[in-house]
Image: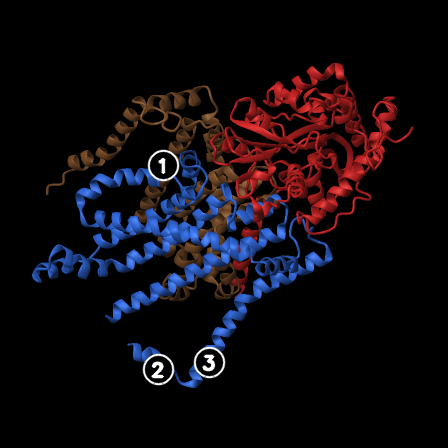
Amino acid sequence: MSLLAFAPPRSGDFTAALRIRLRHAALGLLVPLTLVLVWALASAQGWLPEQILPAPSFVWQNLCDMAASGELAQHAGISAIRVAAGFAVGAGLGLLLGIAIGLSRPVEDYVRPLFTAVAQVPTIGWIPLLMLFLGIGETLKIVVIAKAAFFPMVVNTAAGIRNIPVSYKEVAAVLRLTRWQSLRRLVLPGALPPIFTGVRYSLTKAWTALVAVELLASAEGLGYLLVWSRQMFWLDTMLAAMLIIGLVGYVMDAMLAAAETRLQAWRIDA
Amino acid sequence: MIAARSSWRIILAALLAAFALAVPSLARAEPLTIRIGFASIGVDNRPFAGGDTLAVAHAEGYVQRALQADPDVKVEWYFFKGAGPAVNEAIANGQLDFALQGDLPSIIGRASGLKTKILAATGAHAPTYLAVAEGSSIKGVKDLRGRKVSIFRGTNNHLAVVKILAANGLTERDLQVLNMDTATTNAALASRDIEAAFGNFPLISLAEQKKAAIVYSTKGDDRGLERQCALLVTEAFERAHPDLVAKVVKALVEAARWSSDETNRDALIAVWAKSGTPASVFRYDLADQDLRYRNAPIVDPFFVEQYRVQAKQAKAFGLIRRDVDVTGWFEPRYVDQAVRELGLERYWERFGPDGKPLGS
Amino acid sequence: MSRTTATQIRRGLTLPVLLLVVWEVASHAGLVDPRFLPPLERLAGTAWREATEGRLLGDLAASLARDLVGFAIGTVLGLGFGTLLGVSRGAERLLGPIFHAAKQVAVLAWIPIISVWFGFAETAKIVFVALAAFIPVALNTHEGVRSASVQLVEVGRALRFSRWQIVRRIFLPSAAPAILTGVHLALIYAWLATVAAEYFMTVGPGIGGLIIAGRERFQMDLVMLGVVILGCVGFALNQGAAAVEARVLRWRGA
């Protein structure tokens, strides 16, 4: 399988495929490029007041300035640390609870209703309440992000384990595996793809929660950059911050999607 | 193929129609509505402002009375929790005709290309305070290094704060600055989520409840740290309705005249207290200040010079990215005319750019 | 391991009841500051007072109206856009990439620019809610319509359906499950966006405003009341959507 995948295609096919891909990429870029051109033209001609949309060159210049001064790296770094910490805590706990629910009906019976009730309130709804409890320090941010990452992880892990084919369990019984062995060798590998989907959702949710909590209470980070530039009416910085938030979200999701595809392929291979 | 093309069109038309619904219609309704915005809001979002003369013109009905002869003209008042920055957004959207704004936000607006005219002063020489959580070890501005301090960014306190910090050898980067609106600041200081806050009179309210202590005030410090507020009008509205601008400004001048009278000090404070801030707070805020000095509506060379200097400083401190030219921004014609009509030419003293009284 | 409904209910209630008892005891015994954890009866009292004398019902109505109007606009636009991308390869190649890039911007990051573009009136909030609803609907409609089977389209061609008929009779029914998933998600996102709009945009009546006001005044009971209402509305919307989904899909299957 892997040999086939890596075998070099015949060159004719290759260039044809490349040409098609390039054409698709060009088509996809057509609209954004046209938009940017129209945007630049509109700004230059003064059709669009700059207090509604500053010229793209301003936004670009601003992005370069912030990158050069290290400001961008500082804000992005802080946001990244917060997401990483919150995600690690939330997804880790979510994984544990998900496994417990997936393996044991009584645990599910005890936890599910409370879990469902808490999950009904959007993360953003919890923030003011948590602010009263925890203040506005770093703890608040980690807890909010962890909460956001927790729920999809639990749901996907539990479902993944629950949906493992009965045949696996029969195999475990035949092989006389201990509970721990069957968990490690059969259940977890079997549930890996849905768990990974959970990871992907969790990270997306964590990223959104980060923006929310940084918008509400923060002294640094990408969300703060957004609030701050809004306050100062620096629309170029605001658009630049949006761009970066989108870009980080995109890269994160693309990386996880690629990893997910790999994982599926590996599983089929195995 | 024809069918394909028409289905395209149907979908496109549906999209456009739905989008058109989502976009605000900029057309104004037939009977003219004058939309006036305040860069502040009362306690618990009460629709009243405090601390300036336009608040008096609003709460005491001066503007309504001035427009009595125009039954087709309606007045709508808006109060912005987001203060000056939110007012800028509203002006940019064409949702306001007049606005009361502090110096820095209006300078930021001008730097971003908002087309406005400054008509009159609505409260000059206002102080800025530094409050700390009760029992805090912070005794003055110099102690703020590394501390969590809230500043309502982009408001007219912001520039004053930057200057106060600079005078103490600090910059914003030396502090952990949190951007918070007035209500959030009060809550955060009371719950000790922040260690200190810069702001105006609402902080005194907190000090009176023993939830914070005022450790610094610009009162008695450098006069260059004082904040100014002004009434602005959009250029478009001024061009279209100079008669209405004259009436609104005249109402403001009358309110300013009443607010400048020392015999009305208690009454003035009572009007401002409609915003929910206790009267005692305004009494403190106004203490040792001549009402005629603080509430003068006139646009004198000192007032213009203040904006010119503030614009330069805002640029120097990196709060705006472009130079703001104040020439042509001020339109004192209306306030001068109102002052003349009311026979108040000698009531408010005019000051020169250097802050010294102009000889009459 | 018998697992009757009764056991399930008993087990399900154990934790919530335990939690409430601990809460009540703790706040009465003075183990926690009642400012942080007001006793339950005070919470109930606040709820009653706000509902009968306060502006709770007005706030709720305002939030729901905002939510549903934004949801409706966003869903209609999302259906149109998703279908366009699904039926037309050209449109997919032209608009797909920019849509997929734009959807990566965490939806809350749109709030500042929407405020600048649409100002302080209700419009800005509705535009934001509509945007939040638009994305999942467009995404799922696109997926659903695109994956509608090619053979079915062939059948349609054989029956000399017009393109519009193909869309209506073939694509939409076979894409229905995906579209409904999108609409269901949109309902959840729209509610989240409603709360976010009330937090970050100008003040006005609404449950989000109620919560923020409660936090500013340090009224824990008010904040908790708001959070409970958020949850109840979210739950109701969710259940409603699930019921509609099930019904529509059953009708389709019939």
Instruction: Report the residue marked by disc 1.
Output: C236
CB under 8 Å between discs 1 and 2: no
Measured as percent of width and height from the top left, residue B47 is found at 61, 26
Secondary structure, mark 3, is helix
Instruction: Say what amino acid the circle numbered 1 marks.
Output: Ala
Mark 3 → mark 2, Cα distance in angstroms: 17 Å
Instruction: Report the residue marked by disc 2.
Output: A7
Measured as percent of width and height from the top left, residue A77 is found at 48, 55
Q: Residue at left 67%, top 48%? A: B317
- The residue sitting at the bottom extreme is A11
Mark 1 → mark 3, Cα distance in angstroms: 53 Å
Secondary structure, mark 2, is loop
Q: Residue at left 69%, top 32%? A: B36
Mark 3 is surrounded, within 10 Å at the Cα level, by few (under 14), some (14 to 19) or many (20 or more) other residues, namely few
**Between residues C23 and B357, which one lies in front from this camera angle?**
B357
- The residue sitting at the right extreme is B360
Mark number displayed over residue B68: none
Q: Nearer the viewer, mark 1 or mark 2?
A: 2
**Between residues A108 and B19, which one lies in front from this camera angle?**
A108
CB under 8 Å between discs 3 and 2: no
**Between residues B302 and A38, which one lies in front from this camera angle?**
B302
Provide the letter of the chain coloured blue.
Answer: A
Instruction: Report the residue marked by disc 3.
Output: A16
Provide the letter of the chain coloured brown.
Answer: C
Instruction: Say what amino acid the circle numbered 2 marks.
Output: Ala
Q: How many marks?
A: 3
